Image: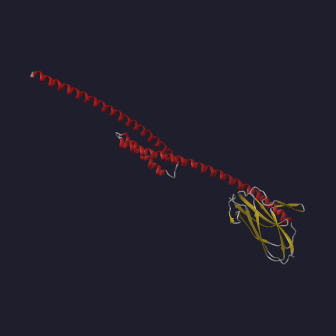
């Protein structure tokens, strides 16, 4: 009876140990399987980070060749990427280092995006400056031609004027202004804001000239050779004078200050020529520019 009990006891022990061994083997298999999956995920993440770092390095290479102003800073960033590539290549990546590398990749992506945006803005600014430069050269070239034509015309008119004691016109000034709806007036040289010109000059007294009624004709020509203002015409014999407005003066051998506010519908950029004629004779001239 005791022999049977001992045998039964050892049989029970064997069964328990077998079950324990089976459970241990099963647990080890699951643990190994989980470890393999984790290792594969980390390696995939590592390869993805290496790929992104290489792309960032290529982008920095291009930025260094195109951007002389930030070249030193960009070279430093490129070296950081090279160091990261070397470090990650010889490191068994884990979850903690994965977060560090991902953070750096995200920062580099933001840097490359910012550089691309800055490059696009610089190109747009360059194209705009080139257009403005070409436009300015064209305006100045045309202005020179118009000035030469105007000078010839005014000299012809002056040569045909009768020799006589003259009433001099001096201190010719023209101030471009913006007049607001409430009546405030502010000087400006920006064409888009100008809606009025303040024009003034001085008529110097001359005792050799008898008191008389005089008519001064103010001619304002823009950079496109257009008469601005009221655009009137006066004929002196065979000569025709186009002018912006006239200003009557009762001359009594006294020095007078003449001032006029001339409204403008639309001002154009460029150089303007202002001439004051005493009948068909050029009495004074000046220029101003609007940008």
In the figure, residue 163 lies in which quadrant? bottom right
Q: For this rendering, which residue is in front, 161 or 192? A: 192
Name the residue: 51% across, 46% down.
113
- In the rendered image, residue 205, in percent from the top left (x then y), is placed at 81, 76
Give the answer, above or below, for where 197 lies relative to 53: below
Which color scheme does this rendered protein use?
A: secondary structure
In the figure, residue 192 lies in which quadrant? bottom right
Q: Residue furthest right?
A: 237
In the figure, residue 89 lies in which quadrant? top left
The answer to whether residue 81 shows anywhere in this view is: no
- In the rendered image, residue 164, in percent from the top left (x then y), is placed at 87, 72
Q: Is residue 76 shown left or right of residue 287?
A: left
Q: Is residue 286 shown left or right of residue 279?
A: left
Q: Residue furthest front?
A: 1
Name the residue: 42% across, 40% down.
49
- In the rendered image, residue 231, in percent from the top left (x then y), is placed at 81, 59
Name the residue: 72% across, 55% down.
141
The answer to whether residue 145 shows anywhere in this view is: yes
Q: For this rendering, which residue is in front, 102 or 211? A: 102
Q: Residue furthest left?
A: 2
Give the answer, above or below, for where 120 lies relative to 262: above
Q: Is residue 33 shown left or right of residue 200?
A: left
Q: Quadrant of the N terminus?
A: top left
Tally the numbered discs: 0
Name the residue: 73% across, 63% down.
196
Q: Quadrant of the C terminus?
A: bottom right
- In the rendered image, residue 126, in percent from the top left (x then y), is placed at 60, 50
């Amino acid at each position: 009876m005791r022999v049977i009990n001992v045998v039964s006891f050892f049989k029970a022990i064997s069964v328990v140990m077998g079950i324990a061994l089976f459970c241990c083997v099963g647990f080890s298999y699951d643990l190994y399987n989980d470890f393999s999956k984790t290792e594969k995920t980390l390696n995939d993440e590592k390869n993805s980070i290496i790929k992104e770092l290489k792309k960032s390095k290529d982008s920095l290479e291009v930025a260094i060749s195109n951007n002389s102003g930030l070249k030193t800073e960009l070279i430093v960033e490129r070296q950081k990427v090279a160091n990261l590539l070397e470090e990650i290549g010889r490191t068994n990546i884990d979850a903690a280092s994965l977060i560090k590398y991902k953070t750096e990749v995200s920062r580099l992506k933001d840097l490359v995006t910012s550089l691309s945006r800055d490059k696009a803005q610089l190109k747009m600014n360059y194209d705009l400056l080139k257009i403005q430069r070409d436009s300015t050269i064209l305006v100045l070239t045309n202005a020179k031609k118009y000035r030469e034509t105007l000078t010839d015309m005014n000299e012809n008119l002056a040569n045909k004027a009768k020799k006589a004691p003259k009433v001099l016109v001096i201190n010719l000034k023209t101030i471009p202004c913006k007049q607001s709806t409430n009546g405030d007036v502010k000087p400006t040289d920006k064409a888009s804001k100008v809606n009025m010109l303040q024009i003034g000059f001085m008529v110097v007294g001359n005792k050799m000239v008898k008191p008389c009624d005089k008519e001064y004709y103010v001619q304002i020509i823009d950079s496109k050779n257009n008469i601005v203002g009221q655009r009137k015409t006066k004929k002196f014999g065979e000569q025709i004078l186009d002018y912006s407005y006239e200003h009557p003066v009762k001359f009594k051998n006294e020095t007078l200050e003449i001032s006029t506010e001339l409204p403008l519908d639309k001002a154009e950029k460029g150089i303007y020529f202002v001439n004051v004629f005493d009948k068909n004779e050029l009495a004074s001239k000046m220029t101003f520019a609007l940008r």
